[in-house]
Amino acid sequence: MAGELVDFRFTEEDTFAFPSLVTTVTPQLEAAVVHTPEWSEKDLQAKEVIVVLDGVQDPGNVGTILRLCLGFKASLVLVEAADVTSPKVIRSSAGAIFLVPWMKVAREDAEAFISKLNRPVYRLEKREGSKLLGQADMEKPLVLIAGSEGSGIQLSVDAPSVHIGHAALLDSLNVANALAIALHHLA
């Protein structure tokens, strides 16, 4: 269920207080106070693709991934990821935080949670034995796990790995870019 938007507009007399309410140097001239949405497992399951972010700490990436989930009709599970309610995640999500079902899951509960989803699971990572994304038989509904660029996927979920082919000179793709390609492929 999306958060309730409360309209609060400033008058010219109020503009002196506005800078104290926003976190950017050159903000847009509108701000809102909203309730953080609460989503259920049923909301997550309503989407054919559930993306699991394992340790993705960059708020810009998390916000971008929320936008990708909105664009490609996916939901999102966050395991030790950047705080979804941080101002930078909210800004970079461009409002997707209020439209995409998302849920934080503690690392110690993540593997049981993923198992309970009762879907095929794939790990988006380039490692020995992984299949090229276009050559893997991936049928929806499914779970797609992506890790941070520095640490990769830390969850020990036993699942096939898929990767995106790219030039050997490039060590790895940015996690948001990789998910954009993977979600587009799955669409």
Image: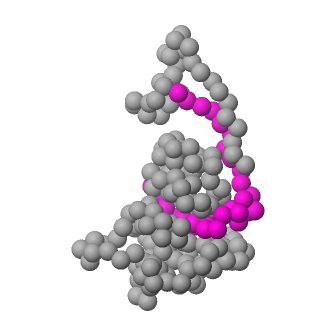
Vertical placement of 36 versus 120: above or below?
A: above
Using the rendered image of the protein, determine whether residue 134 is visible from the camera's viewpoint. Answer: yes
State which quadrant residue 39 falls in: bottom right
Residue 43 is covered by the magenta coloring: yes
Using the rendered image of the protein, determine whether residue 62 is visible from the camera's viewpoint. Answer: no
Residue span colored magenta:
30-58
Residue 119 percent location from the top left of the image:
67, 77
Tell which of 74 and 149 is nearer to you: 74
Residue 78 is covered by the magenta coloring: no
Residue 38 percent location from the top left of the image:
71, 50
Vertical placement of 166 versus 6: above or below?
A: below
- What residue is rendered at 52% in x and 53% in y? 67
- What residue is rendered at 70% in x and 38% in y? 4
Vertical placement of 28 versus 172: above or below?
A: above
Residue 112 percent location from the top left of the image:
69, 75
- What residue is rendered at 55% in x and 60% in y? 72
Q: Name the quadrant of the C terminus.
A: bottom right
Tell which of 116 and 164 is nearer to you: 164
Q: Which residue lies furthest to the top in this view?
A: 13
Residue 85 percent location from the top left of the image:
58, 46
> In the displayed structure, does residue 49 sit left or right of residue 161?
right
The coloring applied to the image is one colour
Q: Which residue lies furthest to the left in this view?
A: 169
Q: How many marks?
A: 0
